[in-house]
Image: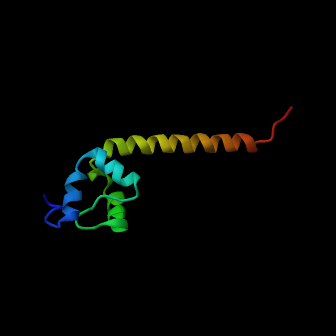
Amino acid sequence: MLNDLGMKVAAVSILCQDPRVFFAMEQSGTPCPFEGKIGNEANAAWLKYEKLRPDYNQYVEKLTVIENARKEEEKKKQENNTPKTN
């Protein structure tokens, strides 16, 4: 209904209350609006106020997986750069 009235940002904001939609929007490179901000401004605001994300729990899990993978990669790099003694 909001979209039909020309209120596209408001319509998307309603959809973005669903964590699945929020996640899908982010993955597509189109962040959900944040207090009237859209695009890069909205993305910056979501990063600053990440606890307000409707997908916060999923977001934290994803960050944990990414951080663990980064640490594992760094550990492998260090092991490969360490001279082996025989």
Residue at the extreme front of the image, as rendered = 4
Query: Which quadrant of the rendered structure holds the N terminus?
Result: bottom left
Residue at the spot x=13%, y=65% of the render?
5
Residue at the spot x=81%, y=37% of the render?
84
For residue 4, side relative to residue 63 (left or right): left
Q: Which quadrant would residue 42 be assigned to in this image?
A: bottom left
Q: Which quadrant would residue 38 be assigned to in this image?
A: bottom left
Residue 21 placement (x, y as % from top left): 29, 48
For residue 22, side relative to residue 1 (left or right): right
Residue at the extreme top of the image, as rendered = 86
Query: Which quadrant of the rendered structure holds the C terminus?
Result: top right
For residue 57, side relative to residue 1 (left or right): right
What colouring method underlies this structural image? rainbow
Residue at the spot x=37%, y=54% of the render?
26
72 or 25: nearer the viewer: 25
The number of numbered badges drawn on the structure is 0
For residue 66, side relative to residue 14 (left or right): right
78 or 69: nearer the viewer: 69
29 or 53: nearer the viewer: 29
Residue at the spot x=59%, y=39% of the render?
72
| 66 in relation to 35, above or below | above
